Amino acid sequence: MMRIAGWVLAAVVATAGVASAQDQQTLADIRQELTVLHVEVQRLKREFSTTGSPAPNLAGSSVLERVDAIEAELQRLTRQTEQLNQRVQNIVTDGTNRIGDMEFRLCELETGCEISGEPTSTLGGASEVTAAAPATPAAPTSVEQGELAVGERADFDAASQALADGNYQAAAEQFATFETSYPGSPLAPEANLKRGRALVGIGDTREAARAFLASFTGDSEGAFAPEALFELGSALGRLGQTDQACITLGEVGVRFPSSTSATKATQEMASLGCS
């Protein structure tokens, strides 16, 4: 980001030179200043290219600690993205104003030039700025979240019916297929929760724990989060990981104190002898 600041400063200094020596400048001088500024903009765009693999710190001694680390990392990246977005917008605004000023001076040196009623195009292109504005993606995002792919609801209902009928093996397989067929589905938290229950039904507790964890991390504040967290803690207890189970079950009451899962978690903790 220091390189961005240096480039912007260079552009500002170069443009300031235009203002201080306007009377002495020729048409070629102003054209050269415009060329320099556009070169700096291209360098700025290259800052959006990655230079290496990300290395977030997601370490933790327990499942919940790792989940909390993931949430903290997401919050950090969100804040950083908002800050960078604001900086880019400020650069675009300032650069657009400066280009407009230079275009006006350029027109003054040309015979018969008329720029009234011709606004300066936004730096970087109007389409790019529009795409970056928060108002533009808001509508399609909400639509995408509310829509399901063709056959998505039918596949989910079929797997749910197999679970309700006690056909746990078929339900586990169908929910696994659902997860791979519809990545990012809004039904994913519930599907993973039900897949975990189906796996419990066939005695695969370890895979069930993973399914419950996937359900919780998929939407840690959603409607199915309390039950998924409780089921995860219960599964860990059955796997003999008592300490992890107690921590996880205790977190249910902390995060969702008014849920029915909190009451069940308290009872489960008592049966495990959690201190």
Image (cartoon, rainbow, N blue to C red):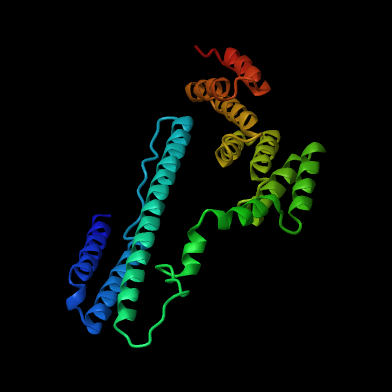
Q: Is residue 203 left or right of residue 112?
A: right
Residue 107 picture location, percent across and down? 34, 80
Residue 155 picture location, percent across and down? 76, 52
252 is higher (above) or lower (below) than 40: above
204 is higher (above) or lower (below) than 53: above
Residue 196 picture location, percent across and down? 65, 37
Q: Is residue 239 left or right of residue 187?
A: left
Q: Is residue 8 left or right of residue 24?
A: right
Query: For this rendering, which residue is in front, 24 or 270?
Result: 24
Query: For this rendering, which residue is in front, 111 or 42?
Result: 111
Residue 104, visible in the rendered structure? yes
Residue 183, visible in the rendered structure? no
> How many marks overall?
0
Residue occupying the point 64% across, 20% down: 258
Q: Quadrant of residue 239?
A: top right
Q: Quadrant of residue 119?
A: bottom left
Residue occupying the point 49% across, 11% down: 275
Q: Quadrant of the N terminus?
A: bottom left
Residue 148 picture location, percent across and down? 71, 54
Residue that protrudes farthest toward the bottom in the picture: 111
Q: Is residue 147 left or right of residue 249?
A: right
Residue occupying the point 25% across, 57% down: 5
Query: For this rendering, which residue is in front, 131 or 189?
Result: 131
